[in-house]
Image (cartoon, rainbow, N blue to C red):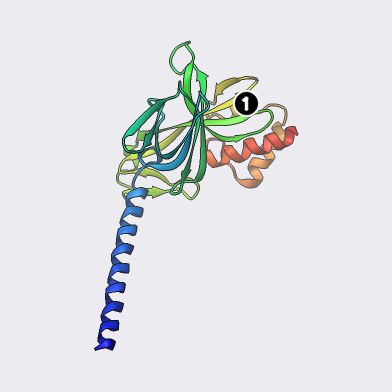
Amino acid sequence: MEAFTLKKMCIMKKAIFSILFVIFAFYTVEAQNQFPSQIWHKGNIFLTDGQTISGLLKYDLENNVVQLQNETIITFTASNVSNFEIFDETYGGLRKFYSLPYALNGDYETPIFFEVLTQGDNIALLCREYIATDNRGMNNWGPTTMNPFWGPTMVAGYRLAFNYYFFKNGGIERYSLKKKDLFTMLPGHDEEIDLFMRKNRLEHDKRGDLLRITAYYNDLQN
C-alpha cells in the first residue's frame, strides 16, 4: 500500500511539473511574439522630485510615458521623470532611458524619452524605437523573426525600427543613417573607424553595430 502511494505521488509530481513547464513555455512564446514596449518589465523610475519608484514598468515612447503596475496602473510623463531603467529579460538586459529636451515636432523643445545605448566623455549614442508596418516580410517569414542581438525584429507583418541620435556638444543631433554622416557625427578618426568597421564587418545603420562603433570612437578620444 505504501509503495503504491509513493508511486502515485511520483506520478502526480511529474504531472504538476509537466503542467508548469507548459505554462512557462506558453508565456515564453507569448513574450517572444511581442515587442519590448508591449511587455511589463521589472524596473525603477527616478522622478524629478528625487523619489525612486520600483515595480513592473511598461514604456510608450510614442506618447513619452512610462507606466507603473501596482494595485492600479500609474502613468508618468517625461516631464516628471528624470530617467527610468528596466531589466529586459527577453530582449537585452538592463536598459536605461532618460528624459531630455528635444524639438521632436517643430522648433519647441519638450522633454521626451531617449534610450542611452552607450556613452563616453564626449559623445553618447541615443535611440528611440518604434513599431513600423513591414509588408515585405509577410510572405517570407513566420510569426516572429529573431535577431541574435535584439529579440524579434518582426512580428506578424510589423517590425521593430529605430531612430538614432548623438548627444554631443551639449545638444542632440539626429543621425540620418547615411554612412557619410556617421563620420560627420564622429569626427577626427575617419580612417580608424573605417578600418574598425571593415575588420569587424559592422554596418553603419544597425543598432548593435552603431553601439560598438560609438564605444570605439569614445575609446579613441581618451
Residue 141 seen in the figure: no
**Foreground pick, 131 / 23:** 23
- The quarter of the picture where the N terminus appears is bottom left
Under mark 1, the amino acid is Met
Residue ranking furthest to the front: 2
Q: Position of residue 162 (x, y in %)?
A: 46, 33
Which one is nearer the viewer's eye here, 150 or 16? 16
Where residue 68 sits: x, y (%)? 38, 35
Instruction: Residue 206 in the image: state x and y as whole percent.
Output: 52, 38
Query: In the figure, is residue 14 to the left or right of 175?
Result: left
Residue receiving disc 1 = 185
The relative height of residue 16 versus residue 54 in the rendered view (above or below) is below
Q: Report if residue 131 is visible in the image.
A: yes
Residue under the point 36% across and 33% down: 132
- Left or right of 1: which side holds 92? right
Frontmost residue, 185 versus 87:
87
**Which residue is depicted at the point 61% across and 30% down?**
124
Q: Quadrant of the C terminus?
A: top right
- Please identify the quarter of the rendering in which residue 16 is found: bottom left
Q: For the residue carrying disc 1, how many other residues have a C-alpha within 10 Å: few (<14), some (14-19), or many (20+)?
A: some
Q: Residue at x 57, y 21 (%)?
A: 172
Q: Is residue 54 left or right of residue 169?
A: left
Q: Tell me where residue 137 appears, x and y as whole percent.
A: 34, 43
Q: Give the residue at the far right of this rendering.
A: 222
